[in-house]
Amino acid sequence: MSIKGLATGIGSLPHQDADKAVDFVFKYLPQVPFWPQLPKRDIREGMVAQFSEHLPCLKVTPDGLYFDNCNIENELETFYDRIISGDADYFKINREYAEGFYSFYERLKSGGVDGVEFIKCHVTGPLTFAASLANREGVAFLHDEIFMQAVIKGLAMKALWQLRMFRQFGKKMIIFIDEPYLSSFGSAYTPVSREEVVKVLDELTSALKASDVLIGVHCCGNTDWSMFTEVRGIDIINFDAYGFTDKLVLYAGNLKGFFKRGGILCWGIVPTQEPLELPEIDPLLRKIEDGIKFLVKKGVAEMKVRENLLLSPSCGLGTLDENRAAKVFSRLSELSAILRKS
């Protein structure tokens, strides 16, 4: 099964009606559909709150997600009892937190698998998740060893639950770890070391790898892309190809080894934040071709790049309106059709 030129989405859509969101996904991306996150529908569908259920001491209210004044020892004991027993159902995402997940699942269950080649899931990355929350002393989870470990293990269980739910449909699966926090890596805003990033992603991907799934990491800004090539469990690197192809190709030496072990680049080629009309097809294709030519010039095998090329928007579409989202996905679908034929 070739992934060449196939297209998928990142996660969030602007819809509030879950069934319409799923219709939208299957209309434009029928080969690699994904379950849609709907942050405009409910605060619980925000990218951190959505994966917070049953993680120790976290509570969601109409005002947002916060650290509850809980009995930490008791909550951690219950949490790790469930982890040790492998109780993925305990970590499921309930419907009020992910209406799009259940609508998507029901569509597949009712026979919506024709033409589907891969099913894509997603989970917020542990670094982004942990950087968004603080303990009762005001220390970010990112710098609290106890809660950082709980975040990694809890998110792994939520990812495994998703994969188990979709495995029954007999399709190859993809799961993206969404790490927008790393788009400012190296600045004062991301006080975390390169070694820590690799270690955290290694731990998470190792927990998922036995599930026979392609694991991707999504970062919608510029970062140190070599970090992801070092994590053996990462199969797909998803980057903003519209805005940062010139930055990513500087890591051609690292990408050479990544492609040799079967790595896939997911080109986020259709911009989601452009204020004017979307770019036409030809300039977007040229961006991809120029990126490929540069990688080949630096010694990366051209066939490896072309055969292991996936497409996506540059980021999620949750902040857009539905008309703009349709234009982004329509352009993406057109690009995919061209690359699949070439």
Image: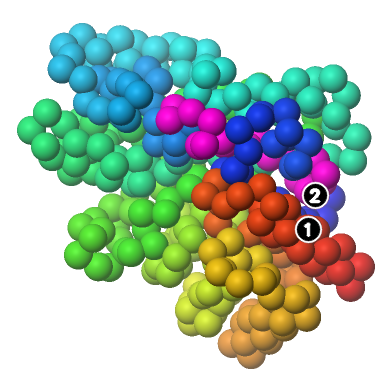
Quarter in which the C terminus is drawn: bottom right
Name the residue located 60 percent from the left edge and 56 percent from the top edge: 236
Location of residue 290 (image quadrant): bottom right
Residue 149, horizontal then vertical, whole percent: 29, 33
Q: Are the residues flagged by discs 2 and 1 in contact, CB closer than 8 Å?
A: yes
Q: How busy is the neighbourhood of tag 1: few (under 14 within 10 Å), some, or many (20 plus)?
A: some
- Asked if residue 4 is positioned above or below residue 204 in the image, the reply reads below
Residue of label 1: 330
- Asked if residue 311 is positioned above or below residue 38 in the image, the reply reads below
Q: Nearer the viewer, residue 147 or 301?
A: 147
- Left/right placement of residue 90 relative to residue 214 reads left
Residue 227, horizontal then vertical, whole percent: 41, 62
Q: Nearer the viewer, residue 308 or 124?
A: 124
Q: Is residue 273 visible?
A: yes
Compare marks 2 and 1 and give the one earlier in the sequence. Answer: 2
The disc placed on residue 28 is 2
**Is the image coloured rainbow, by chain, by secondary structure, or in one colour?**
rainbow
Three-letter residue code for mark 1: Ser
Name the residue located 65 percent from the left edge and 35 percent from the top edge: 35
Three-letter residue code for mark 2: Tyr
Q: Nearer the viewer, residue 93 or 162?
A: 93
Name the residue located 70 percent from the left edge and 36 percent from the top edge: 21
Location of residue 303 (image quadrant): bottom right
Question: Which type of secondary structure does the marked residue at label 2 adopt?
Answer: helix
Q: How busy is the neighbourhood of tag 2: few (under 14 within 10 Å), some, or many (20 plus)?
A: many
Q: Main secondary structure of the magenta part?
A: loop
Q: What span is in magenta?
A: 26-44
